[in-house]
Image: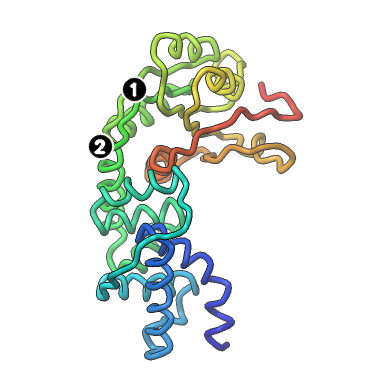
Amino acid sequence: MPFSQILGPELPYLRRFARSLTGTQKAGDAYAAATLEAILAASDIFDRSLPPRVALYRVFLKVWNSVALHGFTETGPCSVVERSATRNLEALTPRPRVAFLLRAVEDFTQEQIAIALDCSVEEVGTLLDVAGREIAQQIATDVLIVEDEPVIAMDLEALVLDMGHSLIGIARTHAEALHLVETQKPGLVLADIQLADGSSGLNATNDILKSVSIPVIFITAYPEQLLTGTTAEPAFLIAKPFKADTVKAAISQALFFGQNARPIVLKHHVS
């Protein structure tokens, strides 16, 4: 299969990643173009045994690490969110920044990130932890956990504190969640859907969002109740049993890009 057919579908994603990494569209496009030129000049650097996007990003990162392209400035419009994200990215050290973007924006697995960065999976885990802590230093926040299972709540608490954030408290019911919010406004909510007394974590977060605009990450054994395809769906939804690195990536992404949640109304009541 010719390179045009292999690479064509992946180029929009590469341009998005390049822009996120470099901070400007012009510089990102320049690195993307340099990547394609490198592949055309020496086709053996593109490993056809890998998934095309992984192989392409692997070449891109080799180019990005070895070639300095100077003189590029962004002249087009840039939103407040984009400017904020760029400032946040610039504060991250290079390899953790790459690992974070591959995980949070490109949805690469740790194994795929290891291939793209030419390192071990263990090193990827370390890089993501570093990125999470560096992000927390910039955007440390107070977290509310809405979860009725004590062991899971303790795991989430340890994870949040390890990343450098603070904990408002753990709520087991809708009423407890609203009571905690009355005393201190959270900057992030981690919420289950079905709670101890039969109340709804979804309803609790919707009530919280009436008074404050913040990110919400749902961590639930019933993801199908929110992924109906018929109404607005949450930006962050993690199925139980969860992996710690998945939750960490979602927390970092939600805070880093300022992805605030909106109330979700389901056609069928979630109890």
Question: For this view, does 79 lie left or right of residue 69?
Answer: right
- Tell me the CA gap for discs 2 and 1: 15 Å
Q: Residues within 10 Å of mark 2 (few under 14, many from 20)?
A: some
Secondary structure of residue under mark 2: helix
Identified at 52% across, 40% down, the residue is 236
Q: Kindly indicate the quadrant of the structure image that contains residue 155.
A: top left
Secondary structure of residue under mark 1: strand
The residue type indicated by label 2 comes to Gln
In the rendered view, tell whether residue 82 sits above or below residue 5. above
Q: Residues within 10 Å of mark 1 (few under 14, many from 20)?
A: some
Q: Which residue is mark 2?
A: 137
User: Quick one: label 2 or label 1, which is nearer the N terminus?
Assistant: 2
The residue type indicated by label 1 comes to Leu
Q: Kindly indicate the quadrant of the structure image that contains residue 257.
A: top left
Q: Position of residue 93 (x, y in %)?
A: 23, 53
Q: How many marks?
A: 2
